[in-house]
Image (cartoon, rainbow, N blue to C red):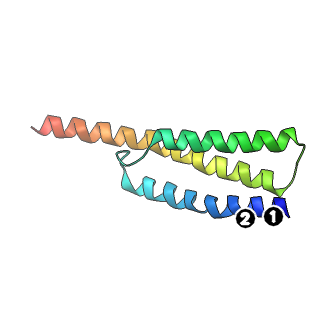
Amino acid sequence: MPDFLEATMLVCFGLSWPISVWKNIKSHTAKNMSMRFNLLIIFGYIAGILAKCYLHAWNYVLAIYVLNLVIVSCNVLVYYRNKKYDAKDELLKNFAV
């Protein structure tokens, strides 16, 4: 039962990440994104994965941790992509003046 409850929490929490990634891809800006927040979440998922590995709990919960980690990591990639868009927009704005 504890694994089921942990998996439920991870799935509920993890459903927001694809939405966040998609929103950030569409926005083309990193101005409303927090790298610190993403890194904190990544650290938490890594801690959860390490705890499962330490306990030799090789089950579906571990897979959910890994899936969430991958999706949040995509948000980090999108952040750097959007930072490039922001720099380009700033350059064009300064050049147009």
Give yes or no for contact between labels 1 and 2 (Cβ–Cβ under 8 Å).
yes
Residue 27 figure quarter:
bottom left
Residue 7 figure quarter:
bottom right
57 left or right of 93 in image: right
Q: Identify the secondary structure beneath mark 2.
A: helix
Spatial CA span between label 1 and label 2: 6 Å
* Three-letter residue code for mark 1: Phe
At x 18% / y 40%, what residue is drawn?
93
24 or 89: nearer the viewer: 24
Q: Residues within 10 Å of mark 2 (few under 14, many from 20)?
A: some
Quadrant placement of the N terminus: bottom right
The total of numbered circles placed on residues is 2
Q: Which residue is mark 1?
A: 4
Residue 24: percent from left, percent from top: 44, 53
Looking at this view, name the residue that lies furthest to the front: 2
Q: Which residue is mark 2?
A: 8
